[in-house]
Image: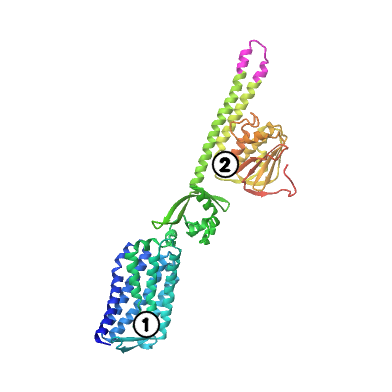
Amino acid sequence: MEEGSVELIRLVYIVGFGLAGAGCLLSLRRTSRIEAPETRRGLAGLLALSGVWAFTHVARFLTGDPDAQVAAYLIGLTVGLATVGAWLYFCSAYTGRDYHHRTWIRQAALATYLLTVTLKLTNPVHGRYFTTTMTQAPFSHVAIQLGTVHWIVTGLSYALSAVGFYLLYEMLSESRSNVTALWGLAGAMALPAGLYALSVESPLLVLHYEPLGVAVFAVGVLYAVDEQFVAVPQFWRNEVIDAIDEMVVLIDQDRTVRDANSAAGEAFRQLADGVGRRLDVVAPELATALDDDATVFSVERDATTQYYLLDTTPLGDGQLAIGQALVCTDVTDVERQRRELDRQNEQFDDFRAAVTHELRNTLAIADGYLDLVTDRLAEETVDVRDATRQMEHSLDRMEQVVADLSTLARYGRTVDEVDPCDLSTAVERPHDSVGTDVVTEVEPATIAADEGRLVELFRSALQLAAERGGTRLVVDPVENGFTITTDAEPLSPSEVDRAFEYGEAVPSAETGMVFPMIETLARVHGWSVEVDTAYGDGVRVRIDGVDVLDRDRDPDATPA
């Protein structure tokens, strides 16, 4: 081969690797534009190591000293092996994985690297990694004959590098953006490995050509398609959402879950392994809230109700919408306070209605009879005693209404603490104060309640039975509650609909406050109340949501 051609070939190698090294090192400043710190560090490490690796090739071709060429080769091998770690770190961070955080992987990688470097540096002793000879083709240089250990290390390095390419492939294949250019740049990274394999059986020098591919990749992603490079990573990044205390669920346009942080997995247990599944399958409450454009939604969990504030944010690359970020903040305490405030406001409105109707109506009756007595007393044409008795009854009724309102004001707040309460004792305590002959029957049971409020609830029940002509009052514990049954006159359908409304004289003026009292004293415990419309032998009220602590009854017994 002519001397001019030899020098041209040498120059091509020197310029090629020199440009690759310069491209890698000069691109380092450009990495500052990448906002994700771990991606930035990974790419910067890859560029720095690849740049140094490329310049070790340049050094080999510039010097004619065989020992210097071998030294440059050893340095290149050491630095080149480190690029595998930088490449995997970059791919893991860029694609939103956490492999680069795992301690055992980092420790295993460091141990493998140190062992391999030791084998390389001690090659003059064992000669298993490579041997050298001087050759004149295509120009004078130290030729490297690769040993068994080298091929084992190279195979391991390429296998590990392939993991990084797979992570990129998975990300790019799932992206809805135009990633054609990134596909090409990723392919450019892989081509030099093929050149290295060909160099063993071709005129090409036996060299690691990987720095050339890294240089093309670096210039491409940092200068040509930098905006796309930053925008295309999976928007469901683990390192971002796991740092957020709120529940975060990331979905695509088809409402398929792409990622969810640990907080979301705790609230919706199926989300822990729900990636790739539809939102309405793994978190139906959240899907329903999204359909209804709900700001606050509830989740039943462990026998309690949790409330969450839902905020949605569209995700995309600036031109194409690719999904949504669903951020849910736990507002259980705030929502419960709001609902309690609403309940208390409703209760105060009820008080106003009760005062307007009950007191004014009772006073109007008393005033009417008083006018009658005043107008007719002189004529002696009416029974004065009957009129005064009606006045006395109305005034007594007014006194009872005032007492009921006082009870509501005293016990109308939500119960903070409950104690074990015996149903029999709670029913018997108000019996004498009501002054009725109604017979009570109670199945033994213990429930969690506020004793004072529970006693007042049964006082109202006894008043209902007495005023409606009942002779028996039966309290029977059932699953999650109890029933109050009396043989008093049944309610009509219209009376049932209005029974729990303040300001309605249901079922009569004398008992108009009884049903609202029972409901209020139950609701402050968190219980629900309803009239059993299927029961036709009297009046039966069912109270649910009760914590029945102990129930001792004949299993064959049936409610009265």
The relative height of residue 540 versus residue 398 in the rendered view (above or below) is below
- Earlier along the polypeptide chain: callout 1 or callout 2? 1
The relative height of residue 427 versus residue 193 in the rendered view (above or below) is above
> Farthest top residue?
379
Residue 142 circle label = none
User: Is 514 on the left-hand or right-hand side of 8?
Assistant: right
Magenta stretch holds residue 542:
no
Q: Residue at x 41, y 77 (%)?
A: 157
> Magenta region, mostly helix, strand or loop?
helix
Q: Position of residue 524 (x, y in %)?
A: 57, 41
For the image shown, how many numbered marks are present on the structure? 2
> Farthest right residue?
556
Amino acid on which disc 1 is placed: Ser
Q: Nearer the viewer, residue 71 or 447?
A: 71
Magenta range is 370-388
The relative height of residue 45 versus residue 389 in the rendered view (above or below) is below
Q: Position of residue 233 (x, y in %)?
A: 41, 62
User: Is 461 on the left-hand or right-hand side of 329?
Assistant: right
Pointer 1: what residue? Answer: 199
Local SS, label 2: loop
User: Is 286 on the left-hand or right-hand side of 148?
Assistant: right
Q: Position of residue 247 (x, y in %)?
A: 47, 55
Q: Nearer the viewer, residue 106 or 3?
A: 3
Whole-Å distance between the Cαs marked 1 and 2?
84 Å
Viewer can see residue 495: yes
Q: Nearer the viewer, residue 93 or 384?
A: 93
Viewer can see residue 452: no
Residue 524 circle label = 2
Callout 1 touching callout 2 (CB < 8 Å): no
